[in-house]
Amino acid sequence: MLFDVELATEKVSEVASLARAADAMGVGAVWANEIRHDPFVLLALAASSERVRLGTAIALAFTRSPMNLAYASWDIQKLSRGRLMLGLGSQVKGHIERRFGMKWEPPVARMREVIRALRAIWTAWQTGERLEFEGRFYKINLMTPFFNPGPIEHPKIPIFLAGVNSRMCVLAGELCDGLHIHPLHTVRYVKERIFSAVREGLVTSGRSRGQIQLAASVFVATGKNQRELQRAREECRRQVAFYASTRTYRGVLELHGWGDACDRLHAKSVNGEWNRMSQEVSDEMLREFVVEGLWDELPRLLKDRYEGVLDRVRLYTPFDGSPGWAGLAEAFMKGSVQT
């Protein structure tokens, strides 16, 4: 199991130094999200590092054409000397339509085409073959030499897909190199729902479990003492409430008998009752969704929960490069855990 970190700083000017710090600590990868900044811009800055892998967790697939994604990924892959892991996600209907002002279409079918189109474009650039892709959502068949960036030294770009519900996880198993598991997960949900869906996709494509990596960002309530731990626990309660109010994630809660909590949280979010939502997240729910312990206990707690379940794990907590992270990374990677 590899230990990665979240590159989620609000100060874009810090990205390069954070990536180099992660590099020096020996972590497996830095993952840039798409919340307030473009993840490709962040990774272009992070490419000044030497060894650490660079990933998007995630880049939004449906707010860009496959060609936009292809150009950005190709440039980062070349700039980083082959260290990119392209993580793609669909987002939910409300954000696609109301935040980005774009059309929502069947997400699994469309994502399948995005992945296939990306690989067709990259192949055309690398080999000089004619670009010819046609599907239900995309028709891409124009690539003149003037617009072709040409071959690169490391043309194989791993694709990770963000999946919560079964059909997207099946698609990841069928076509992708990795699956990003949403932080709103439980080990039971991963074992009972995600594993079976990924296996179905692997069987369809004739692949083995070793050909796909399962990665997850993990909610962690931690601190140096009990006071900090209590404060972190309540922050996690608010974060769980925020995500659990999205009906796309209802299946995770339903498995544990908490579907009605999702309904109540959604109603409060619609009414703007953000300050009251954390009341719906019980201590029992927190125990399933959150790893809780003092900072120096985290390596053991993460291994106890996720060894044999995940291939890559990272804290939902943004990486800040402070010395404590070096100790965490070193302790995590000791023994059977290797980078």
Image: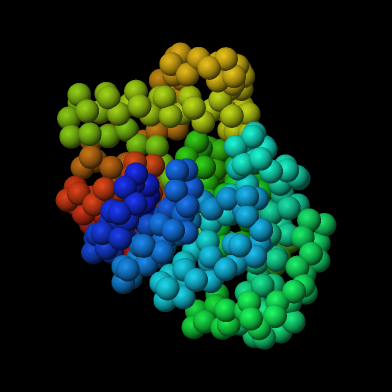
In this view, 102 is above or below 276: below
Quarter holding the C terminus?
Answer: bottom left
- Picture layout, residue 318 above or below residue 84: above
Give the side of residue 225 with respect to residue 172, left or right: left
Q: Is residue 71 left or right of residue 336?
A: right
The N terminus appears in which quarter of the rendering?
A: bottom left
Closer-to-camera residue (42/82): 42
Q: Is residue 305 visible?
A: no
| Front-lying residue, 272 or 198 | 272
**Nearer to us in this view, 329 or 143:** 143
Seen at 71% across and 46% down, the residue is 107
The location of residue 253, given as percent across then percent down, is 57, 28
| Quadrant in the picture for residue 201 | bottom right
Name which quarter of the figure residue 157 lies in: bottom right
Q: Is residue 185 visible?
A: yes
Q: In the figure, is residue 282 to the left or right of 212?
A: left
Residue sitting at 52 percent across and 82 percent down?
Answer: 152
Q: Please report the residue visible at 70 percent of the width from the left and 66 percent of the height from the top.
A: 117
Residue furthest toward the front?
146
How did the renderer colour the structure? rainbow
Q: At 69% across and 54% down in the image, what residue appears?
A: 111
* Count of labels in the image: 0
Q: Position of residue 314 (x, y in %)?
A: 38, 49
Q: Residue furthest bottom?
A: 128
Does residue 68 lie above or below 50 as drawn? above
Can you say whether 191 is above or below 26 in the image? above
Residue 242: x and y in percent read: 49, 27
Q: Position of residue 131 (x, y in %)?
A: 74, 77
